[in-house]
Image: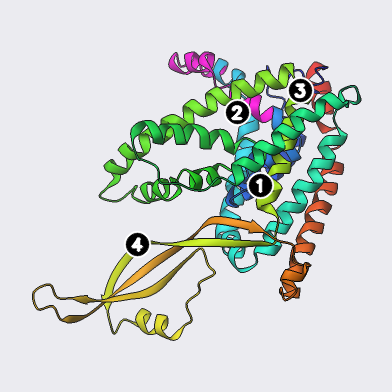
Amino acid sequence: MSNNRKDPFIELFDLTRLKEIPFLIMKGFLMGSADIVPGVSGGTMALITGIYDRLIFAIKSFDYKALKYALSFNIRDLFNHIHWKFFLFLGSGMVLAVFFFTRVVPLQVYMFTHPEWVYGLFFGLIVGSIFLLLAEIDPADRNWKNIFPLIGGTLFGLWIVNLVPADTPETFGFVFLTGSIAISAMVMPGISGSYLLLIFRKYDYILSQLSMLGTSETMSAIINLAPFVLGCLFGIILFSRVLSWLLKNYYSITILLLIGFLIGSLWVIWPYQNREYTEKISSTETVMVDDPIVDELRESEEPVWRPEYDRLGERVVDPETGLETNKIVIETVSLQLISSKPFVPWSEEHHDFDPDKKRDGLFGIILGMLMIAILYFVKSKKNDDIVTESRQ
């Protein structure tokens, strides 16, 4: 097995150049948008856009030496050591994506109202990237032996996305372990960190603790989040070093394994799925029965296919008299995916499937693959140019 890592200097230097800034922001935008969708990871987009190895080595730059520089207030050597420019522009794109797809174009809402289109888009992105990445494998490494890491990665990816959520404890050790695994998955192509949080039944727990920050229960939330944060730090430090070692010494095997993860993830990204959701009341509010919001909720149909919506609960009962009062509870309900089973919409069993939804899924797939083709031409040889400049 040859070691064909293309950019031998990315481990030591931040190779970010001014002309690369808009492309890094764009790639960060893709990573941020992917992290919003359960089942898709930012690592997938990093691998697709050709910055995956740079990302891993950039994370690795935050090491013991960086800590020593920081503690000694040696700012100059600290910034020379860490890949801060890479993170600054990549992170800017990710923040922009989160803002855009939560405030401007609510992608999480479209995942419920138009799932075929959204998942079709990411399915097309992943399918296109698989062919692109396979084509970039060193010809010397294209032999029958290397099919094993590809098959192994595929089977592992399928196993992960088909795990059934189970009840789990909220002890320090388990929450720490959950954080370590989830953050590692967030940089692992084909495996979603948010999806693993759902499997470990800690997605709601972490979000609820985050929502308590800034309230009277802030201190309690900080204490409960501490093991998760520590687990994330431990996981990303350990995982980045393992991956960087694999990329340095077994580049093609590692890439083939990651491609296998991508293939396995297609099972849950396929746009046509029978998805099962569970309802969770995330918050409640008590209002008077003559409040305008009560009339509005009574008149409107319940928007079931939304990630979160309000509905009328029970009238408040006076504990002393046992009689209903003139107050009513408004419940904020969150819908959360617990399982999905793919199907073929053109089969006889699903002959009555909505034709518009069939079209949306196909359109999303084609658009995703077209985006990959565009990305391929945009990034053409850019990393090689950066390395050439760094040598001059």
Secondary element under disc 4, as helix, strand or loop, is strand
Q: CA distance from mark 3 to mark 4?
A: 48 Å
Residue 51, visible in the rendered structure: no
Q: CA distance from mark 4 to mark 2?
A: 39 Å
- Label at residue 84: 2
Q: Residues within 10 Å of mark 2 (few under 14, many from 20)?
A: some
Look at the numbered discs 2 and 3 and tell me whether their residues touch, using CB distance below 8 Å.
Answer: no
Tell me which numbered mark, 3 or 4, is placed earlier along the sequence.
Answer: 3
Q: Which residue is mark 3?
A: 251
Q: x and y percent of residue 28 in the render?
A: 66, 42
> Looking at the image, which residue is at 75% across and 68% down?
358
Q: How many marks?
A: 4
Q: Which residue is mark 1?
A: 29
Q: Residues within 10 Å of mark 1 (few under 14, many from 20)?
A: many
Of residues 359 and 207, the one drawn nearer to the viewer in this rendering: 359
> Looking at the image, which residue is at 66% across and 18% down?
245
Q: CA distance from mark 4 to mark 1?
A: 31 Å
